[in-house]
């Protein structure tokens, strides 16, 4: 009789296996994609707090506001985000040449990329403390916020903050870009003293009602975005934007929406996980819809896109005609930057830089 019991035991175990399949998913939480490591989040909070405090009172008529008034002309902060290389540094160097007074460069390079040094003069020494970034995770948002915070702290003259990837190239000269941004009439409002105050706009794409939005909204689970982000306030837009200074402060100061957007996506929603395309447009549309153009000035070609990657241009495609074509837009302004270009486009781009790209 005893000899039977192992058999019965195995039999029972076998019977219970299907039960496990039913029960386990209910007991264990669903699998999620990578999230933000706590130490990174703690470092960021300290940095963002410093940037927020340093920027507080900017624009106010207080003595502090006056003291902070920058002595130099407004500058553009170029925020380079890379997880591989900065192959186009020589092209950007040509773009910046002679305009050092009107710009600053900041680089967030994923430490895992082991970027080759030294880089050209504008980029050397311009690295900010960086952390690892990954697709389909909120780490790309954190990297952009880190760049904004570093640039806010570094120079009160930074008036615009342009986020640029390692695959981006300029489509115009620096003078053209600077003039387009600084001469934009912006929005105006009446100050408390009854004076008309002009404020710069941010150039950020903000779209609603696109077909992919519902899955993107639920990528972290159903209803988890509530109550901070109801579905009808959820927006999408290109990851690459140019923010006015007050919006850079707003982004770095935000805790409320970040609490939601920092949550990792569910493994099962991997194909709908692009938090960096939602956080910025959603936040700005909630806080200052009239202060944003709702379009981006960075051209991207989504024809025949594969796996969330846009068309990548290769050397045989690079030509003066391509540059002129990429500049064309349906907005008030011509496109200023374009992506994505493969690293080996550098030489053909340098060849047409003076004759085409920097000739406006
Ligand atoms: C989205 O679509 C709804 C109904 O079609 C419309 O009422 C709403 O204004 C749209 N929202 C935006 C921001 O375009
Ligand atoms: C966009 O990419 C497609 C191929 O994916 C190409 O045929 C087309 O010429 C590109 N458009 C522009 C404006 O470069
Ligand atoms: C401009 O709008 C037209 C019509 O909607 C569209 O076909 C074209 O692709 C747009 N061009 C650009 C550069 O976005």
Image (cartoon, grey):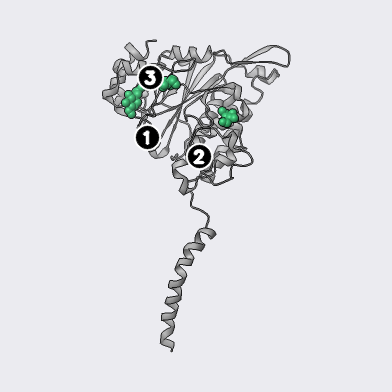
- Mark whose residue sits in front, 1 or 3: 3
Gap in Å between the C-alphas at discs 1 and 3?
A: 24 Å
Tag 3 and tag 2, C-beta contact below 8 Å: no
Depth check, front residue: 135 or 331 = 331
Q: Residue 157 at x, y = what percent?
A: 55, 18
Q: Which tag, 3 or 2, sits closer to the chain's start?
A: 2
Q: Residue 174 at x, y = what percent?
A: 43, 14
Quarter of the image with the C terminus is: top left
- As helix, strand or loop, the secondary structure at mark 3 comes to helix
- Mark whose residue sits in front, 3 or 2: 2
- Residue 248, located in which quarter of the rendered image? top right
Q: Which mark is residue 216?
A: 2
Q: Residue 45 at x, y = what percent?
A: 58, 38
Vertical comparison of 20 with 344: above or below: below
Q: Which tag, 1 or 2, sits closer to the chain's start?
A: 1
Quarter of the image with the N terminus is: bottom left
| Residue at the disc numbered 1 | 84
Q: Is residue 345 left or right of residue 30?
A: left
Tag 1 and tag 2, C-beta contact below 8 Å: no
Q: Which mark is residue 326?
A: 3
Gap in Å between the C-alphas at discs 1 and 2?
A: 27 Å
Q: Residues within 10 Å of mark 1 (few under 14, many from 20)?
A: some
Vertical comparison of 268 with 300: above or below: below
Q: Which tag, 1 or 3, sits closer to the chain's start?
A: 1
């Amino acid at each position: 009789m005893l000899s039977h019991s192992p058999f019965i035991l195995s039999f029972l175990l076998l019977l219970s296996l299907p039960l496990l399949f039913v029960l386990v998913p209910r007991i264990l939480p669903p699998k999620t994609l990578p999230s933000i490591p706590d130490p990174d989040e703690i470092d960021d909070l300290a940095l963002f707090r410093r940037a927020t405090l340093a920027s507080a009172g900017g624009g106010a008529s207080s003595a502090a506001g006056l003291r902070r008034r920058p002595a130099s002309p407004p500058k553009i902060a170029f925020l380079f985000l890379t997880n591989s290389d900065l192959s186009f540094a020589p092209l950007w160097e040509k773009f910046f040449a002679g305009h050092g007074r009107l710009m600053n460069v900041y680089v967030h390079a994923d430490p895992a990329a082991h970027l080759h040094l030294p880089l050209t003069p504008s980029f050397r020494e311009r690295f900010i403390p960086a952390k690892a970034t990954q697709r389909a995770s909120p780490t790309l948002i954190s990297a952009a916020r880190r760049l904004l915070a570093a640039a806010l702290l570094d120079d009160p003259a930074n008036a615009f903050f342009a986020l640029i990837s390692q695959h981006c190239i300029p489509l115009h000269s620096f003078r053209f870009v600077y003039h387009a941004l600084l001469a934009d009439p912006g929005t105006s409002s009446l100050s408390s003293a009854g004076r008309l105050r002009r404020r710069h706009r941010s150039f950020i794409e903000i779209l609603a009602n696109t077909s992919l939005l519902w899955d993107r909204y639920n990528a972290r689970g159903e209803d988890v975005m509530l109550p901070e982000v109801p579905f009808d306030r959820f927006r999408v837009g290109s990851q690459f934007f140019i923010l006015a200074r007050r919006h850079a402060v707003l982004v770095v100061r935000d805790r409320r929406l970040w609490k939601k957007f920092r949550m990792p996506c569910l493994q099962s929603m991997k194909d709908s996980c692009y938090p960096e395309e939602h956080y910025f447009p959603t936040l700005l549309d909630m806080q200052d819809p009239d202060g944003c153009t709702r379009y981006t000035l960075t051209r991207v070609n989504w024809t025949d896109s594969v796996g969330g990657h846009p068309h990548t241009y290769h050397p045989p495609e690079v030509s003066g005609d391509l540059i002129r074509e990429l500049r064309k837009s349906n907005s008030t302004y011509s496109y200023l930057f374009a992506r994505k270009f493969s690293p080996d486009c550098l030489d053909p781009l340098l060849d047409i830089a003076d004759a085409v790209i920097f000739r406006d």
